[in-house]
């Protein structure tokens, strides 16, 4: 299912940490952005098939039964899941794949792919800034924001488990850090397209 010549980039972090803003800087001609399924309603400006596949809870559960998900989770009464078909779509187009998912999904992919994937945690500079970002969205009640902040405290406990951590205080700096991680990981020996040719010449 996987191709070591292409990166599998798994990005996670608390809601409001800025994952989506950072990922927008990656070129679409090189990266395939895995689209998750969810049972929540679209937020203003979100597009079906681009931001998420917005489906009913009944449809979601049917996909679970059919074994169509790499991982899925229920968060705050909402289901989220990553389809197995997304990997094939990415590699068939000759692109690196990016998973923007929550912490439980990331741990599932870590179990499945181990060192074949690169795991990056995006963290906020502090909780007051995280709360400001969530309030600025204007899409959720104070109660839901408080739940997200409590969940964020639990998510931050997983930081040591990740390959890299980016504290998103300044967007441009965070984008630069992510691009540096991608360059470094792309240079690992087993990902080099020409590696087999080089080895044949020296062995």
Image (cartoon, helix red, strand yellow):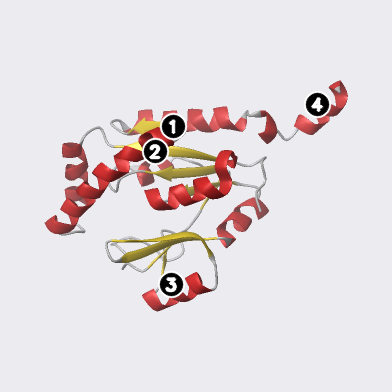
- Residue 71 relative to residue 2: left or right: left
Residue ranking furthest to the top = 202
Identify the image quadrant of residue 147: bottom left
Could you give the CA–CA distance between mark 4 and mark 1, rounded to whole angstroms? 30 Å
Residue 22 falls left or right of residue 190: left
Q: Secondary structure at mark 3?
A: helix
Contact, CB < 8 Å: mark 2 with mark 3? no
- Can you tell which mark lies on residue 198? 4
Q: CA distance from mark 2 to mark 3?
A: 27 Å
Any part of residue 56 in sight: no
Q: Nearer the viewer, residue 138 or 115?
A: 115
Determine contact: label 2, label 1, CB under 8 Å: yes
Judged from the image, the secondary structure of the residue bearing numbered disc 4 is helix
What is the distance, in whole Å, between disc 1 and disc 3 at their CAs? 32 Å
- The residue that label 2 is drawn on is 121
Task: Check whether the beta carbons of the residues at disc 3 and disc 4 lie within 8 A of each other.
Answer: no
Task: Locate residue 138, reporting x and y percent.
Answer: 18, 55
Q: Which residue is mark 1?
A: 164
Q: Nearer the viewer, mark 4 or mark 1?
A: 1
Which is nearer the N-term, disc 4 or disc 2? Answer: 2
Left or right: where 54 falls relative to 125: right
Residue 72's x, y, as percent?
44, 61
Name the residue carrying label 3.
60
Q: CA distance from mark 4 to mark 2?
A: 34 Å
Q: In this image, 202 relative to 182: left or right?
A: right
Label 2, residues with CA under 10 Å away: few <14, some 14-19, many ≥20: many
How crowded pointer 1 is (Cα within 10 Å; few <14, some 14-19, many 20+) is rated as: some
Above or below for 130 versus 176:
below
Give the number of the mark in front: 3 or 4: 3
Q: Of the two numbered discs 2 and 3 on the same chain, state the one appearing first in sequence.
A: 3
């Amino acid at each position: 299912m996987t191709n070591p010549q292409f990166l599998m980039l798994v990005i996670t972090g608390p809601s409001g940490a800025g994952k989506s803003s950072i990922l927008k800087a990656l070129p679409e001609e090189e990266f395939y952005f895995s689209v998750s399924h969810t049972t929540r309603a679209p937020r203003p400006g979100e597009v079906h098939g681009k931001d998420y596949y917005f489906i009913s809870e009944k449809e979601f559960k049917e996909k679970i039964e059919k074994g169509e998900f790499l991982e899925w989770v229920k968060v705050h009464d909402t289901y989220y899941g990553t389809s197995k078909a997304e990997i094939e779509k990415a590699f068939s187009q000759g692109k690196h794949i990016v998973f923007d998912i929550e912490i439980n999904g990331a741990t599932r992919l870590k179990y499945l792919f181990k060192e074949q994937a690169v795991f990056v945690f995006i963290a906020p500079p502090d909780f007051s800034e995280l709360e400001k970002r969530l309030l600025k969205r204007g899409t959720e009640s104070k109660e839901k924001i408080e739940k997200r902040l409590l969940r964020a405290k639990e998510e931050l406990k997983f930081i040591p488990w990740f390959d890299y951590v980016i504290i998103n205080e300044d967007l441009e700096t965070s984008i630069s850090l992510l691009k540096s991680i991608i360059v470094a990981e792309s240079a690992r020996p087993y990902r080099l397209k020409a590696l087999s040719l080089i080895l044949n010449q020296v062995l």
